[in-house]
Amino acid sequence: MGRTSDAKSRLIAAARELIYARGYTAVGVQEICEQAGVNKGSFYHFFPSKQALVLAVIEAHTQQLQRGWREVMSASCSLNTRMHHLFEAAYESQRICANDGGQMLGCPLGNLALELSTHDPCIRLKLSEAFATWTHMIEHALREATTHGDLPPLDVSATAQTIVAYFQGVVLLAKTRNDPTLVKALAQGAVHLVEAAAQAHISPPSKAGIPPTSQTFHIRN
Amino acid sequence: MGRTSDAKSRLIAAARELIYARGYTAVGVQEICEQAGVNKGSFYHFFPSKQALVLAVIEAHTQQLQRGWREVMSASCSLNTRMHHLFEAAYESQRICANDGGQMLGCPLGNLALELSTHDPCIRLKLSEAFATWTHMIEHALREATTHGDLPPLDVSATAQTIVAYFQGVVLLAKTRNDPTLVKALAQGAVHLVEAAAQAHISPPSKAGIPPTSQTFHIRN
């Protein structure tokens, strides 16, 4: 039984590594089995299809990323600092990955989202749920900040979505340049998204296009 | 000669359509030839490899997208409106694509960037150049706005990069949800990125974390 469960974990681990490096379509079941040291018959004992395996891979990535997001977003430091930590953690993991393999690999969920959303609605929904979970964590942190008076009662749902989108876009650009430092360099944009959402709540732009004068809002450093 | 050039264009058009819908790795040369009505021998007359074809495909996408970006970014309306038009144009094309095929396909450059940046440095560089061109167009618009006094002299390069990143991330999330309306719903985030960058220039956050009082900056509606 121990051995059986080990084979399943090895298949997921091998698939995670291979698919993260080269994408879902480019990696075959045979190659995954070889890297895991598991025969093809056993593969189909655990996973009825390659789709079932990639769902398990997405689950494993999500669990790991969630632990990281939760750690960063629930830290006792300011929201501003937590936003920076989110990007710094991504920078650090991408820097290591680029140092080790010569190429940064980006966000495993973002990669699969763009590769597979048009292929399979089950995979798309699984990825969409992972992004929703992440968005909820940021929403929670924003709501907490509004409760403590660190932020005005802004639209936490929309603002959290802008942050997740921004993070994904920054990682996409950095991967395309193969330059992990871009993730750190553009971190302040996430703080800007919160600040401007807060500012818009305090003083909505006048219809005439004349900048109003009011208190400026900055989330705490 | 007319016929020859027609075959090449047909190959590029077929590859654009198939790769945009399903990704580079999932589409074979044979299928592209069949859709284009060109035999495989002729394919290799025009393109020494599938890589050469995808470079032509990226070039074709970039040329088309550039025309759209240029049109939007050089319009005589305010920067705020131009930012919204950028997202509305993307929403409109994604809405049509989702209506026609049941699934929004996202940004063809963003899709290939995440799928192929780790596969091939030539393709990665080609995509990186396309993003750089787009960033330069936004930089130009921001610089113009600072010259006209509509914006303070903010860091146009960093701000333009945040906008391109944000756009890509928004389209990624919308594709994962298969919901083109998200592209329109989150457009204001791009305006927020410019507003907050301008605000940070006017009144940098105090180190003590106390929100300073100063004139609020809103880019014109």
Image (cartoon, coloured by chain):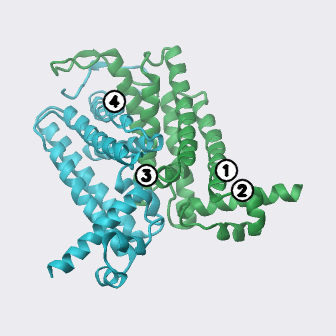
Chain colours: A green, B cyan
The subunit carrying tag 4 is B
* Mark 3 vs mark 2: in front: 2
| Residue A188 horizontal/vertical position (percent) | 41, 38
Q: Secondary structure at mark 2?
A: loop
Question: Could you tell me which secondary element the residue under label 4 belongs to?
Answer: loop
State the image coordinates of residue B175 (x, y, percent, origin top left).
43, 44
Which quarter of the figure is the C terminus of chain B placed in? Answer: top left
Q: Quadrant of the N terminus of chain B?
A: bottom left
The mark found on residue B204 in the picture is 4
**Where on the picture, by quarter, is residue B183?**
top left
3 and 4 marks in contact (CB < 8 Å)? no
**In terms of sequence position, does the residue under pointer 2 or pointer 1 come before the other?**
2
**Residue B118 in the image: above or below residue B8:** above
* Residue type, label 3: Leu
**Cα distance, mark 3 to mark 2?**
30 Å
Q: Which residue is under mark 1?
A: A56
Report the Cα–Cα distance between label 4 and label 1.
Answer: 46 Å
User: Which residue was labeled with disc 3?
Assistant: A172
**Which mark identifies residue A47?**
2
User: Farthest residue in the right direction?
Assistant: A1
The quadrant where residue A152 appears? top left
Tags 2 and 1 on a common chain = yes
3D distance between C-alphas at marks 3 and 1: 23 Å
How far is disc 4 from disc 2 in space, using C-alphas?
54 Å
x and y percent of residue B179 in the render?
41, 38
Q: Of label 3 and label 1, which has the lower sequence position?
A: 1
Which residue is depicted at the point 38% across and 73% down?
B51
**Tags 2 and 1 touching, CB below 8 Å:** yes
Mark 3 vs mark 4: in front:
3
Give the residue type at disc 2. Phe
